[in-house]
Amino acid sequence: MTEAFPTAAQLAEAVEEFLRDELLPALDGRLKFQTLVAANVMAILRRELIDGPAGAAAHQERLASLGVADDAALVAAIRGGEMDDRIAEVIATLRPSVEAAVKIANPKHLR
């Protein structure tokens, strides 16, 4: 079934393409830079809309596997020394969460 309306991710992509392909080449100086920043923001937004919910759910499962409810509880456990003997496990468990966040923010940094 074809959707009657574009998704939020599709709208963000359309704005990003307009900014990069149509507007950016016609500008220079500070306005060109600001337009590039806006295009990058739209790209991040699009990736967040597509991958963010699944990534957040997976991160929550990883936290639960470490026995903490959320990031704040993990920070408190680390600061309190409760994870001192499990630090390798914490790093290995949360590495996919960090990679997923970087993939959304700027996938070029994963190379």
Image: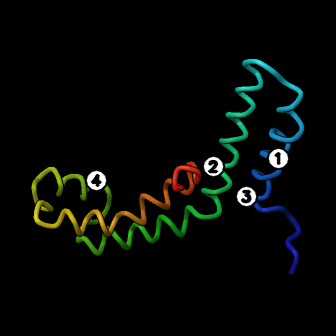
In depth, the one of 56 and 83 nearer the eye is 83
- The kind of residue on which mark 4 rests is Ala
Q: Which residue is mark 4?
A: 72
* 38 in relation to 65, above or below: above
Name the front one of labels 1 and 3: 1
Q: Tag 3, which secondary structure?
A: helix
In depth, the one of 88 and 1 nearer the eye is 88
- The kind of residue on which mark 2 rests is Ile
Q: Which residue is mark 3?
A: 9
> Callout 4: few (<14), some (14-19), or many (20+) C-alpha neighbours within 10 Å?
few
Q: CA distance from mark 1 to mark 3?
A: 12 Å
Q: Earlier in the sequence, mark 2 or mark 4?
A: 2
What residue appears at the point 65 percent right and 50 percent down from the top-left corner?
Answer: 45
Q: Earlier in the sequence, mark 4 or mark 1?
A: 1
The N terminus - image quarter: bottom right
Q: Tag 1, which secondary structure?
A: helix
* 76 in relation to 60, above or below: above
Q: Earlier in the sequence, mark 2 or mark 3?
A: 3
